[in-house]
Amino acid sequence: MALSSKLFRRSSSSTTALAARSMSWWRTVQPAPKDPILGVTEAFLADPTPLKVNVGVGAYRDDNGKPVVLECVREAERRIAGNLNMEYLPMGGSVKMVEETLKLAYGETSECLKDKRIAAVQSLSGTGACRLFADFQKRFRPDSHIYIPVPTWSNHHNIWRDAYVPERTYHYYHPETKGLDFAGLIDDIKNAPSGSFFLLHACAHNPTGVDPSEEQWKEISYQMKGKGHFPFFDMAYQGFASGDPENDAKAIRIFLEDGHLIGISQSYAKNMGLYGQRVGCLSLLCEDEKQAVAVKSQLQQIARPMYSNPPVHGPLIVSTILGHPDLKNLWLREVKGMADRIIGMRTALRENLEKLGSPLSWEHITNQIGMFCYSGMTPEQVDRLTNEFHIYMTRNGRISMAGITTGNVGYLANAIHEVTKSAYR
């Protein structure tokens, strides 16, 4: 009996020690900092005030502030329903979707497509395309850096950091003019070591809404070609910026005409409203078909341990829309409608501020393009908007124009006027 008690006590103490060790595995883990963009939505949802306005979320809303499913998407889903199986896609994704996506970026009659010089794979939206490229860059150019504009979409920093690619920055936004720091940008291109990697926003720069003009893009291309830099375009807003996908691809076409080898991240989150479907594409223009085959095989190998195969439903929607002329034409009308509403809200916000007698110039609101307006407001002014007027946005002053409606634009303008006028008394 005594021996049995000793054995029990020894066993109990061993179990307790083992449990203590097991419980200590994650004791040092601290809560991650909140995402600056997603945190805005959380705060907005927790606010019970009926007058609250969310201009922080990067997703399109209609003039009633409601999420939108495009009619071309609804019709594509009707055509798909019950007609296809749910088998795995190849590691490279939907061949049809990738083909149609490349036509949008490179052009329907692009020689690059005819010559099969493009290595392309389906990705998990634009974020996934950027991450695949970052890992590819690290694997095959391990000593390289990535030059990222100041400012940029906050997740760009996370993507290249977690791929262990060192980051450098280049001038982009000019705070005083609220426009492009073109001279600083060109100087940074010239001063970067030859053969550097540059991340470029193809259109509707996030978060500033400031895009180079066509002539400026030509000069950027010329200077980058002279230094042998590699341009990687993040194109998350094709069609959503101006309402014309061809016009929004002009930067890419300029670089192609100048003979660059380029990379492109494409996404259908914004321009088709397929946010939750995570549909995108990564493409790299290569020297010849043989190189493209090799590069694609390596991209697939990188994707394999990440997620093995990409999703099937979203690409079916995209390929159905782009592969049928009636649906593609409907999409072109709908994406122009979304872009036009955003442009209209820019005009309305500026006009409302000017009618209030604001001492500031708000010309930049209509000069900028795309989903976001970089307002120029300080973090302290943004805090006042939230605390006093229940208006939610990121503290860098970025306004999501999609959150503005004919019903709230006057309230928003008045609030912005109240928090900005005191600095100029």
Image: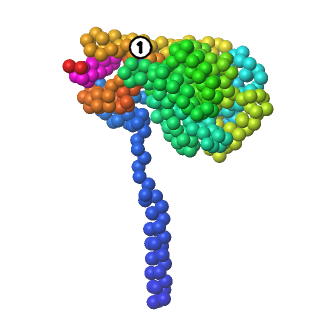
Q: Residue furthest right?
A: 290
| Span highlighted in magenta in the image | 408-423
The x and y percentages for residue 56 are: 40, 28
Element type where label 1 sits in the image:
helix
Q: Where's residue 228, x and y in %?
A: 64, 28
Which residue type does callout 1 highlight? Answer: Thr
- Among all residues in the image, which is located at the extreme left? 425
On screen, residue 332 versus residue 372, left or right, reads: right
- Dividing the picture into quarters, in which one does residue 379 lie? top left
The stretch drawn in magenta includes residue 140: no
Q: Residue at x 61, y 42 (%)?
A: 143
Residue at 24% across, 20% down? 424
Regarding residue 269, the answer to whether it shows in the image is no
Give the residue at the far bottom of this rendering: 2
Residue 422 included in the magenta stretch of the image: yes
Q: Which of these two is toward me, 31 or 252?
A: 252
The answer to whether residue 355 is above or below residue 265 is above
Where residue 133 appears, as percent x and y from the top left, is: 62, 36
Residue nearest the viewer, comparing 376 with 96:
376
Name the residue beneath numbered marker 1. Answer: 366
Q: Identify the residue at image location x=27%, y=14%.
A: 358
Query: In this rendering, does residue 47 appear at all?
Result: yes
Dominant secondary structure of the magenta stretch? helix
